[in-house]
Amino acid sequence: MKFISRLLLAAFLILTGLLLFTAPGAKARQLAQQPTGSIPTVTGTPTGPQVRVNADNDYINVRTGPGTEYNEIGVLIAGETVSAYGRNVAGTWIQIAYPGVEGGIGWVYSPLVTLISGSDLPIVEPPPQATPRVTATVDPTLAAQFIREVPATRMPTFTPPPQLAIATFAPGDTATNGGGFPIGLVIVVLGAIGILGALFSLIRGR
């Protein structure tokens, strides 16, 4: 009995060792036997109405709405083709598929693209314009400190002088006193009397 027990124990240990040895190998073979064929991928092509960027432009801007006042969200290069969803009322902007942005749509200026599929596009309501998150405000109290009122300077006034009266004499007139005696002769006589008086005083002083 003791021999049979030892034999059974040895057989159990051998079986257990074989199971532990073969399990990792089986798992490794299972991991190694992966399919080597290429996984098929689906490459979608635009369907329905499409537009193509004209070749005379290296790239064009894609905006969030039909107008330059809307934000730019990306570009399309020359020759690129995308699906077209609609247009604005005037037909000047076209709504296109533009993955990677919110909503997956954008707008391009219609003269820069060519409609290559679909004769007409439905009119699409444009999105509202984005409003700035922060509106700049000016503190009127602070601004008033930098505003100084400069008093108006009164311009000088010019008063013209009175007209100058220039005396005129008729030809042949001479300056005479009231009795007709020449004034020049009176001045000469008075001057001579003054000179004689001065000489007389000088002589008497000696």
Image (cartoon, rainbow, N blue to C red):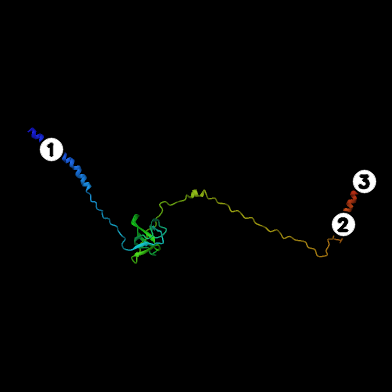
Q: Which residue is mark 2?
A: 186
Is 160 situated left or right of 203 in this image? Answer: left
Question: Given the image, on which type of amino acid does mark 1 rest?
Answer: Phe
Classify the position of the C terminus by image quarter: top right
Res 27 → quadrant: top left
Is 206 situated left or right of 47 in this image? Answer: right
Can I make out residue 121 in this image?
no
Can I make out residue 14 in this image?
yes
Helix, strand or loop for disc 2: helix
Q: Nearer the viewer, residue 181 or 40?
A: 40
Point 89% across, 52% down: residue: 193
Q: Nearer the viewer, mark 1 or mark 3?
A: 1
Q: Which residue is mark 3?
A: 204
Q: CA distance from mark 2 to mark 3?
A: 27 Å
Sequence-wise, the earlier of marks 2 and 3 is 2
Q: Residue 68 placed where, x, y %?
A: 42, 59
Q: CA distance from mark 1 to mark 2?
A: 176 Å
Q: Which residue is mark 1?
A: 12
